[in-house]
Amino acid sequence: MFEKRDKMRIVTANQLQDWLSRGEVLEKDARGAKVLKLDDGDILKIFRSRRHPLLVRLMPDAQRFARCGERLRERGINTPSVTDYFWIDRSAGVSGCLYSPLEGSALDKIFFHERRRFDELLPQLAAYIFKLHQQGIYFRSLHLGNILLVREQCFGLIDFLDTRFKRPPLGARLVQRNFHHLRNYLTRSKISDFPWDELMRHYTIAAQPS
Ligand SMILES: Nc1ncnc2c1ncn2[C@@H]1O[C@H](COP(=O)(O)OP(=O)(O)O)[C@@H](O)[C@H]1O
Ligand SMILES: [Mg+2]
């Protein structure tokens, strides 16, 4: 599915306009819509990179995203599968991709609305993060908004553009840094009652040889 990078097609202005006018914005920032739910149920994710446009042109974010998703799936991790990706504005390094949503609930929703259920999920969540680490997966966007509960006992990842694949397992330093991402998210989101020690305790249990 991966074309030569300079062949990545450019989406027409009409098509983009159609998506933007009919889609429901799920996420936006100061630069505009970032994630839209389209009327056919697909999700359009727009990447306005902070990297230099020349670098982005060599490896467009939408293509990196598709590739990371594929590599995660090869490792048995649930992710939405990208069906198409394209340039939106090549000179500005803006690219986009389409994928069908991964069915499930984001953990932030469960944390805020079903706290008991979240607490019950903690051992499984810790084991899941440990499994990622064991496989050398450094999911830099590790936070509650980017992990979905796909079904009981089964998680999945979205927003995996910045995933790094290291020689497994991740070393202690990277594990620490990865948990820092989660900590920073909790601070940014002003979440003060997160059961951090419990999560760490369950991570340690998951890491014990059985
Ligand atoms: N594959 C998906 N399945 C279900 N919901 C999704 C999916 N992708 C995005 N979303 C929804 O859109 C929101 C933002 O998407 P995300 O990819 O995390 O973008 P951002 O980079 O803005 O964090 C998510 O929190 C989720 O609610
Ligand atoms: Mg996100």
Image: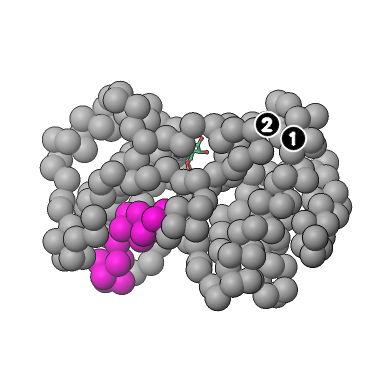
**Quick check: marks 1 and 2 in contact, CB under 8 Å?**
yes
Q: Is mark 2 within 8 Å of ligand 1?
A: no
Residue 114, how many percent across, how many down?
A: 73, 26
- Quadrant (top left/top right/bottom left/bottom right) for the N terminus: bottom left
**Which colouring convention does the figure follow?**
one colour
> Residue at the location (61% across, 59% down)?
132
Give the residue type that dot 1 points to: Phe
Q: Main secondary structure of the magenta part?
A: helix
> Residue at the location (72% across, 73% down)?
172
Which residue position is annotated with label 2? 110
> Residue at the location (76% across, 43% down)?
122
Which residue position is annotated with label 1? 118
Q: Nearer the viewer, residue 153 or 81?
A: 153
- Quadrant (top left/top right/bottom left/bottom right) for the C terminus: bottom right
Q: Residues within 10 Å of mark 1 (few under 14, many from 20)?
A: some
- SS at circle 1: helix
Hey, which quadrant is residue 112 in on the image?
top right
Residue 111, how many percent across, how many down?
A: 71, 34
Q: Sequence order check: which comes first, mark 1 or mark 2? A: 2
- Residue most toward the front? 210
Residue 158, how many percent across, how many down?
A: 49, 46
**Residue 32 visible at all:** no
> Residue at the location (77% across, 56% down)?
206
Check residue 54 for magenta coloring: yes
Give the residue type that dot 2 points to: Ile
